[in-house]
Image (tube, grey):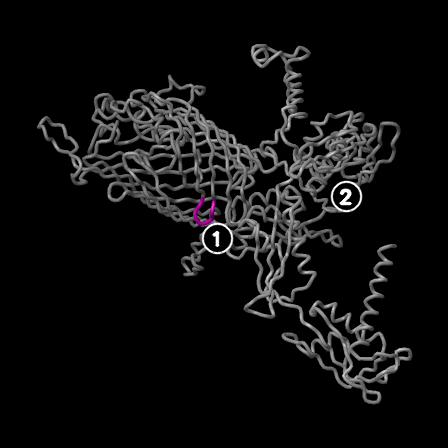
Amino acid sequence: MKKTLFFLAFIFIIINSSEAQFRRRANAPSDTEGGLNYSNPQEYVIADIQVTGLRVLDKNALISLSGLKVGDKIKVPGDQISGAIRKLWKHGLVGDVSIQIDKIEDDKIYLNIELSERPRLTGFTFEGTKKSKESDLREDLNLIRGRILSDAIIRNTELTVKKYYVDKGYLYADVKVIQQEDTVNRDGVKLRIVVDPKAKVKVNKIDIVGNEMFDDNRIKKKMKKTNERVRISLFKRGAELLVGATKPKNIKSFLDSTYEVSGKELKEFINDNVKLNFFNSTKFIESEYENDKDNIIAFYNSHGYRDAEIVRDSVYANNENSVNIDIEISEGRKYYFRNIIWTGNFVYDDATLDKVLAIEKGDVYNKELIDKKLSFNPKGTDISGLYMDDGYLFFRVNPVEVAVEGDSIDVEMRIYEGEQATIKNVIIAGNERTRDHVIRRELYTIPGRKFSRSDLIRTQQMLSQLGYFDPEQINPVPKPNPADGTVDIEWNLVERSSDQIELSGGWGGQLGFVGTLGLSLNNFSMRNLVKGKFNPIPTGDGQKLSMRVQATGRQYQNYSVSFTEPWLGGKKPNSFTVSANYSIQRARQYEDRDGDGVSEYIPPYGKYNAHISVKGITVGLGKRLRWPDDYFTWTNSLSYMVYGLDNYRFSGLDFANGSANSIAFNSTISRNSVNSPMYPTGGSTISLSASFTPPYSLWRDIDYEKVEASERYKWIEYHKWMFDSKYYLTVVGKLVLEAKAHFGFIGSYSSEAGIGPFERFNLGGDGLAGQNFVLGTDVIGLRGYQNNALTPPYDRTIAQNGTGRIEGGIVYDKFGLELRYPVTTGQAATIYGFVFAEAGNNFDNYQEFNPFENYRSAGFGARIFMPAFGLIGINWGYGFDTVPGDTERSGPQFHFTIGQQIR
């Protein structure tokens, strides 16, 4: 009421002041002077309107805004004049305005609108802000150069900057907007936005009263964003729990004593009472504080206290940098479920629905649990999913409390099943480069099929794994058509480039610096290539073409190319892959300097007249399986490789001239259920791979102990088994845990032939492939140790002297944990930091193999994925153990990686 009276009074003052202003401008000192009688208004016709004081604004536009025009009849004095002034002020274009009478002739009146234009904004600057915050503020502020500067704009600018700092925790930030005349443009004004952020306001202490069923720490733990400073008293209950009734006199007696406590008690204590704020912000933000109060009530509700409420809370200053918070809670009584009644259900009986709901009579009443079990349960089935997976898109369920007696509640589940919905149309939007058929072949939402919520989720996952679209923006939109019982599914996609350019370098041991240049086209189109359609490269059919070159100059060169068609024939997800590889490593000449028949290396100026080359081709077929589920794939490949040696002695190979041939069949069964290829937050990958060569030793009639090495290895034989697994779990929020385990084994078909030097394992370092292309060695990374540091034999002179010890392990294991947190997962880049712990070992015989004896490391790092360059990793690792042959532990190591590391 007071506000209404104040507003009316303000309008009255404005009207009277406008009339008074008009009277002054008309130079009428008395009621009758100048032919005007203010006690008896007269009607006049406007003969002309002039405008003075204009600089930029248009005269006719101003007259139009006033609502006056030539030919109108007005009363003087009257409301038309004051109304015209209010209209001009309303638009904010003028600072001061008055309307005066130039002259009156009979019943004609000549008016002049005298005004001063408001200045225009020519620029603005900040004072007292950091560059990073200034950039954010410029985006938030709606300040456009050339715009007329009104009081509202200045006020909004001040409030916007103030709000920005308050949201950052600067509760007492002071903001002033100062107008300065532009010396270059006299009609313009510059704004100087002066900010004094003062100190961040943090939460000093949170006091909770009225809570009898849950202690303070347990309630504070539910406040996700409003955290008080860490206090030693936070651990008091933990110490009391561990020591029981007998408290130690000092720290030494505590450490020297043994106390027994059950795992359940300790777990409950940690879950309920320990809330460490080392990684939590303690700044006070009002909006987040309001959300945290809702979290407290939700916590009480989830434990049966449906009447719980916060009856009072206050936030008050502790000092200029911190506040205290008092919260008073009314808990109410605790309620329990009594009867759960189903009505309206015909498709599923009560027993089936009770089993899915999984709430028994006598369970603590939990409204949040009901909603989860009815609508969406991330950890299992729910009622909506049960119906919607069977096509009942129009299904609804409404839980209603029908009786509350004492501490017991009866809930009636009122169901509307509706009709089953059939998918009518599937619409794809947002794919400009990728053809529709590439997307549609991955869809589980197919026209004519019954609607299924699980099919939507599965399709979303499949489209994410393609890598062509931003996983966070894959949005299925069901559009129900109740009239005919159908539904249209619209898939809204945002494309991102999946092609990659690899430009990297790594240190390759004896090879020195190895440079790599690669190009991977992951959405390639052979059809467009043949037709000559380039935009700028032929894309859109989901095929993969990769080309890669590695070199250290003339000493080492590697060339590889591969092509994959993921849907051979276009009807079934059967992949076809063909790849070719050529590598050569050269060495300087050897000469018999002493005449003893032993060639020795002549450093450093000899010619490259010794080399080993590897030529290979691989053809593979893959198939997506439906059993045990459709996450499985089965891939088979056949490869042929030729190792050619010309005057080249390699450790363990024992011949310098000749060739070795390898024909190998590989079969891999794998399962991939991760929800995003670049930053998985759930799911797993697991694969078992087996490679076999023909068992030549079973029919070759040679003595493997006496035969020349060139004849022994003419046909390579082995069987090789590889197991790789990774599991992803969202710990809390965006924090993700990756757990992984890897094993590799190489065996022979006969003890006479033994295990040759081919396909062995090198362990340690960054795991960059290509450093040991010779003999097909698998390079496995173990951060915290130098490259290939954990590769037997550890006495290098044994291999170099050719005593029969072959370099490389025949069995290895590796385990790891990695805790990741994303910086950004946007379309332009995916960046995340991590801490890790790893352990692994490499053995050259099965007798020494022990999966519990490992070399350990830990560290931290970051990974950056950019669509054009792939995944770049920066790692700092610390090796805790001593490498065989060394006297000190490995210590700190820095690693740089390119590409996704499989192991």
Q: Quadrant of residue 658?
A: top left
Amino acid carrying label 1: it is Asp
User: Where does the N terminus fall, quadrant-wise?
Assistant: bottom right
Q: Secondary structure at mark 2?
A: strand
The answer to whether the residue labelled 1 contacts the one labelled 2, judged by CB atoms less than 8 Å apart, is no
Q: Quadrant of residue 155?
A: bottom right
Whichever of labels 1 and 2 marks the residue nearer the N terminus, that label is 2
Coordinates of residue 735 in the picture (x, y in percent):
57, 35
Q: Could you tell me which residue is drawn at 56 percent across and 40 percent down? A: 675
Residue positioned most to the front: 29
Decide if residue 604 is on the left or right side of residue 473. Answer: left
Coordinates of residue 136 in the picture (x, y in percent):
58, 51
Coordinates of residue 881 in the picture (x, y in percent):
40, 22
Q: Is residue 640 magenta?
A: no
Label 2 neighbour load within 10 Å: few <14, some 14-19, many 20+: some
Q: Secondary structure at mark 1?
A: loop
Coordinates of residue 628 in the picture (x, y in percent):
56, 33
Q: Is residue 867 magenta?
A: yes
Mark seen at residue 146: none
User: Where does the C terminus fall, quadrant-wise?
Assistant: top left
Find disc 2 in the rendering and name its residue: 396
Amino acid carrying label 2: it is Arg
What's the magenta region? 865-870
Q: Find the distance from the CA under tag 1 to the CA under tag 2.
A: 41 Å
Decide if residue 883 is on the left or right side of residue 646. Answer: right
The answer to whether 836 is drawn above or below residue 453 in the figure is: above
Between 48 and 351, the one nearer to me in the picture:
48
Between 809 and 325, the one nearer to me in the picture:
325
Find disc 1 in the rendering and name its residue: 541
Decide if residue 41 is on the left or right side of residue 838. Answer: right
